[in-house]
Image (cartoon, grey):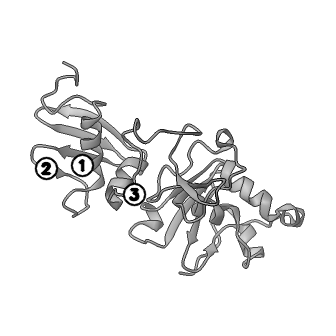
């Protein structure tokens, strides 16, 4: 899909900035700068090849993995090279392992939170390991109910990775879900329904509520606290 330059960054770019943007510096920027990568909202909704990348400056760029195109100004000047947004998508989705030399503490806290994929990191023997980042650190999957596993279905992965808030609404079994897109939906675990437009048998919001209940992070369907 052809993309157009974002109106928020339509101005000219400093040529010295282009010259200084070596492959390694773009890799460092992709891993450490504050960015949010999303694969299921706005212009990237229902499109497996499209990702939205929001930068710390507030700019939003559409990246197409099929064509390798990005709306950022740097990519317009360097169409044959990988920009930092393209690299960030690859690292966040696990398409490219995070280099072994990267200090986990230096990674952006938002790393890989809103995409369907599993970040991986290169290890000394030449292989990769699956990782999940939380506040800049690597979490233990056995202790984290939101850790993604290779056996998880795509909607379960999204339920775990996306910035979703769940709160008890009313008994019996009604919960409010505040999604990353700022939308609010009502999930009824007894009726097995959700007010979102997803027609799947179990949408990501229902799955997230089930995970939160199982992990005792929200009240039970009867309204009582988990340990009551």
Say which of marks 3 and 2 sits in front: 3
- In the figure, residue 120 lies in which quadrant? bottom right
Q: Quadrant of the C terminus?
A: top left
The residue positioned 41% from the left and 38% from the top of the image is: 144
Q: Is residue 172 left or right of residue 225?
A: left
Q: Pick the residue in front: 122 or 109.
A: 122
The residue positioned 21% from the left and 33% from the top of the image is: 169
Residue 150 image label: 3
Q: Which residue is under mark 1?
A: 206
Q: Is residue 116 placed above or below 105 in the rendered structure?
A: below
Classify mark 2: helix, strand or loop: loop
Q: Is residue 52 left or right of residue 5?
A: left
Give x and y (percent) for residue 145: 36, 40
Q: CA distance from mark 3 to mark 2?
A: 25 Å
Q: Which residue is under mark 2?
A: 192
**Marked residue nearer the N-terminal end (3 or 2):** 3
Q: CA distance from mark 1 to mark 2?
A: 8 Å
Residue 182 in view here: no
Q: Is residue 167 left or right of residue 27?
A: left
The residue positioned 15% from the left and 44% from the top of the image is: 188
């Amino acid at each position: 899909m052809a993309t157009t330059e974002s109106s928020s960054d339509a101005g000219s770019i400093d040529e010295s900035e282009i010259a200084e943007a070596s492959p390694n510096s773009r890799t460092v920027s992709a891993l450490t700068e504050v960015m949010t990568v999303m694969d299921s909202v706005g212009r990237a909704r229902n499109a497996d090849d499209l990702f939205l990348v929001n930068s710390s400056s507030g700019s939003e760029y559409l990246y197409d993995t099929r064509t390798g195109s990005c709306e950022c100004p740097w990519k317009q000047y360097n169409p044959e090279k990988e920009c930092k947004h393209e690299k960030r998508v690859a690292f966040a989705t696990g398409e490219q392992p995070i280099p072994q030399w990267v200090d986990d503490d230096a990674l952006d806290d938002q790393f890989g939170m809103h995409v369907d994929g599993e970040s991986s990191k290169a290890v000394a023997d030449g292989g990769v390991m699956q990782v999940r980042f939380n506040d800049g650190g690597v979490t233990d999957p056995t202790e984290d109910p939101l850790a993604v596993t290779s056996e998880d279905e795509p909607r379960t992965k999204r339920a775990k990775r996306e910035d979703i808030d769940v709160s008890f609404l009313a008994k019996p079994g009604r919960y409010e879900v505040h999604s990353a897109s700022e939308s609010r939906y009502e999930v009824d675990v007894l009726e097995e329904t959700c007010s979102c437009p997803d027609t799947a048998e179990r949408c990501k919001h229902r799955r997230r509520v089930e995970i939160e209940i199982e992990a005792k992070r929200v009240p039970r369907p009867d309204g009582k606290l988990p340990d009551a």
